[in-house]
Amino acid sequence: MSGRLRLCHRDDIAEGQARGFLPLPGARRKVIVVRRAGTLHAYMDACPHYAGGTPMAWREDAYLDGTGQHIACHAHGALFDIETGACLSGPCLGRKLTRVPLREEEDGGLSVPAQVAGRAGRED
Amino acid sequence: MNIVGPDHLVFGVEDLEGSKQYLEDFGLTPVQIDATGWCFEALDGTGVIIRHRDDPKLPPALPTRNMLRQQVYGVADATVLDQIEAEMSRDRRVTRLADGGLEFEDDLGFSLRFQVTIRRALDMPAEKINAPGAPAQRGPNELGVTDDMPALPRTLSHVVLFVPDIDKAVDFFVGRLGFVITDILQGAGPFLRPGGNDDHHTNFFIRTPAYMQGCEHLAFHMGGPTELMVAGDRFTRKGYQTFWGPGRHRFGSNWFWYFNSPLGVHFEYDADMDKHDDSWVAREAPNGPEASQMFLLQWREKWAPMGGPEGK
């Protein structure tokens, strides 16, 4: 696990659910983990609308839109494709969420590279 | 034209239950207006009306995915409605509603409604402070903070719109409805107040591409900076997400704290905004971190310097 930070266990993320995890106490941004059609995806919790990115949930873990079909930024209503992170509508059209490489450990733990804790979000 | 300011903002939301919970936790009081609509009121009766986005009672949606459906403005009395009707009827369809109100679209396609204001007069003290050299505002034994102190939104303060054409928006609100520009953030847009309100702004326009047209945020006035901090702290502890703040703006001097919402706009607590009259000359400054705030702070968990050097 050296150089990696554990976020949660794979069973903590139900199908169709998204959750946000702070990779380290005091980290600048959370990492969003979302399960869609059985596959886990992870992105920085940082809407690419503004430089540096801004947090997207409206309440803890509330990252999906009302239909549960997209990741949504509840700052300005932008929608993102869960599989690709691409903005489908809203202010950051043409941009993408920053994908985070997620690794599933033998015990089912989900981890991300340690440098994620220092990441701001949008990387131009 | 004696327009007082926004009475209500109407939204067609995707997540009705989540939105209701959010608005109540924000500090607004729910009032069911019919089988499918709710008004969430500040203390003076102004506030936010929500329905599910498919509700046929809503005005049409904007071409964007923004959930704002209508801005409802209050005016001083029925003669003002007559003035607005006469002015607007020159070049657009104006609907006179059963309650005497007016409905029409502005030049950018936003749905507007005007009515004799529903604002109830508030009679409440402002936050009181004590300072050396000035008479004490709180008497002996009168406490500044208590665990159960109220910190509720008093009135709908302002609405901020993303507009694809600032000139059109300004020509309409200033030229046709008598709003006044109080200050301008270059690169973003102007702050405006209507003839019947001396607040620094009830409206702010931000220049954006057409695919973003809609509401950017709305704000409620609090009783002072401490109430704003207490309300924001309580809201944060319920799990809600800060977008920007707390801090204090330069233009308007108001304290601010913005939160994300399931309505796809920011909700802002604001406090202690400047007042202006017609002798005020609008300032201009380039938009950016320096011009937009005097200072910016960040919420954190409560902490106290306790224990020994080892942190025990």
Image (spheres, coloured by chain):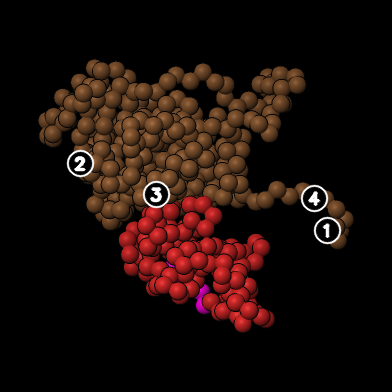
Vertical position of residue B137 compared to residue B294: above or below: above
**Chain letter of the brown region:** B
Q: CA distance from mark 4 to mark 3?
A: 42 Å
**Sequence-earlier tag: 2 or 1:** 2
Magenta residues, dominant SS class: loop
- Expressed as whole percent of the image width and height from the top left, the position of residue B271 reads 52, 34
**Amino acid type of disc 2?**
Asp
**Sequence-earlier tag: 4 or 3:** 3
**Chain letter of the red region:** A
Q: CA distance from mark 4 to mark 2?
A: 57 Å
**Amino acid type of disc 3?**
Asp
User: Label 3, on which residue?
Assistant: B15
Same chain, labels 1 and 4: yes
User: Label 4, on which residue?
Assistant: B305
Count the marks: 4
Q: Secondary structure at mark 1?
A: loop
- Image disc number at residue B107: 2
Kindly check if marks 1 and 4 are in contact, taking CB atoms under 8 A apart as contact: no
